[in-house]
Amino acid sequence: MKKYIIGQIIIIIIILIIVIIYYFKSPSIPENIEKYKKIIDSTQCSIDSLKIELKESDRLIESMGGELINLKNQNDLLKEDIKSIKQNAKNKVDMVDKFNNTELQHFFTDRYK
C-alpha cells in the first residue's frame, strides 16, 4: 500500500512540474494580444489600400463605359452612313442600267464636255 501511495505522490509531483514548466514557458496573454493586434492592424491597412484601389478601378470602369457608349453611337452612325451611301450608289447604278445606248451616249457626252 505504501508503494501505491508513493507512486501516486510521484505522479502528482510530475504533473505539478509539467504544469509549472508550461506556466513559465508559455507566452503570457498580453504578449499574444499585442501580436494579434499587430496582425489585425496590418490586415486593416491592406484592406484599406484595397478599398482605395477598388474605388479607382470602379471610376475607371465607369469612364470607360461612357467612352464605349460614345464609340458605339459613332459606330451606329457610321453604319447608317455606309448604308445610305450604298443605297445611293445602288440607285445610281440601277438608273444607269435602265439607259439604252442612245441615252448612255448622251449621258457621257454631257458629263465630259
Image (spheres, grey):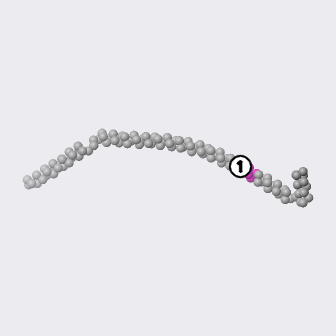
Q: Residue at x 74, y 49 (%)?
A: 81
Q: Is residue 30 left or right of residue 98?
A: left
Q: Is residue 42 left or right of residue 100?
A: left
The quarter of the image holding the N terminus is: bottom left
Look at mark 1 in the image and give the residue it sits on.
78
Image coordinates of residue 27 in percent, x first then y, are 27, 43
Specify the farthest residue to the left. 2
Specify the farthest residue to the bottom. 101
Residue in the foreground of this view, choosing between 20 and 107:
107
Image coordinates of residue 71 in percent, x first then y, are 65, 47
Secondary structure under badge 1? helix
Q: Residue at x 49, y 40 (%)?
A: 52
Q: Is residue 12 left or right of residue 55?
A: left
Specify the farthest residue to the front. 113
Circle count:
1
The three-letter amino acid code for the residue at tag 1 is: Leu
Residue 33 occupies quadrant:
top left
Please name the predominant secondary structure of the magenta segment in the image.
Answer: helix
Instruction: Say whether residue 85 is magenta.
Output: no
Q: Residues within 10 Å of mark 1 (few under 14, many from 20)?
A: few
Q: Residue at x 65, y 45 (%)?
A: 70
Image coordinates of residue 35 in percent, x first then y, are 34, 41
Instruction: Say whether residue 82 is magenta.
Output: yes
Residue in the foreground of this view, choosing between 15 and 75:
75
Q: Residue at x 71, y 51 (%)?
A: 79
Q: Which residues are magenta?
A: 79-84
Image coordinates of residue 86 in percent, x first then y, are 76, 54
